[in-house]
Amino acid sequence: MRIDLIRHGKTVGNLDMRYIGSTDEPLSFAGISELVKINYPDCGRLIVSPMKRCIQTAELIYPGVSHHVCESLKECDFGDFECKNYIELSLDSRYQRWIDSGGEDAFPNGEVPADFRKRCIDGFLESIKTIPEYGHATFVVHGGTIMSIMEHFAVPEKSYYDWHTANGHGYITEFDGNIIRVTDKI
């Protein structure tokens, strides 16, 4: 089954390199401008995160296509790091501990990264149950969501951060129910 994984367009927070997870930011004008210049693949069953930035991206690149919202595909809740960038956090000892953990420790007052990844994988698996009649699904989600799915299913195996993709971009893949193989990049 073909699975396309597309990261939403840029928000103001993305432009400022902020941790934007649970904040429901819309796309920025720059993000919209970049999206309209990208050639996207044909759309399969359209599945989106409930966040504005994902819904707006899906509506912009696939106008008139109805979408299915999956709550479990939301971005990670960065807790006390939410809406801050690395410069603002550089003197916060909690941020340094999180960095030293390789990004595995829980975000203060936020989500545990391992729980976030499991939530995304569960949401992905639940969503693909709805698409056999389509034969193909298009997910418009978050960078962290894509990295979670790819780290778990993709071959060759790579670490979570190795699957980072730029805003508006992503992967065209084949999924056999157990393994994802990248066939192209967006």
Image (cartoon, rainbow, N blue to C red):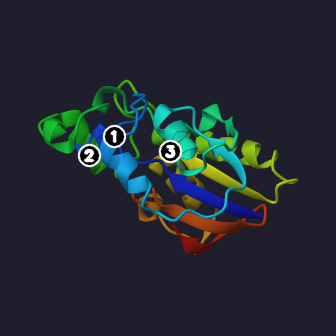
Crowd tier of the residue under label 1, counting other residues whose Cα lies within 10 Å: few below 14, some 14–19, many 20 or above:
some
Which residue is denoted by mark 3 in the rendering?
Answer: 57
Observer-nearest of 123 and 46: 46
Residue type indicated by callout 1: Ser
Label 3–label 1 contact, CB within 8 A: no
Label 1–label 2 contact, CB within 8 A: yes
Residue reaching furthest to the right:
133
Residue reaching furthest to the front:
64
Left or right, 185 with reference to 72: left
Q: Nearer the viewer, mark 1 or mark 2?
A: 1
Residue 113 image offset from top left, x and y in percent: 46, 41
Residue type indicated by callout 3: Thr
Left or right, 170 with reference to 177: left
Residue 139 image offset from top left, x and y in percent: 62, 50
Up-down: is 56 above or below 163?
Answer: above
Check residue 129 in the rendering and tell me which mark sits there, or answer none. none
Observer-nearest of 166 and 162: 166
Left or right, 151 with reference to 169: right
Residue type indicated by callout 2: Leu
Residue 64 visible in image: yes
Which residue is denoted by mark 2 in the rendering?
Answer: 15
x 59%, y 54%: residue? 149
Quadrant that contains the N terminus: bottom right
x 14%, y 42%: residue? 87
Check residue 28 in the rendering and tell me which mark sits there, or answer none. 1
* Disc 1 element: loop
Crowd tier of the residue under label 2, counting other residues whose Cα lies within 10 Å: few below 14, some 14–19, many 20 or above:
few
Lower position in the chain sequence, tag 3 or tag 1: 1
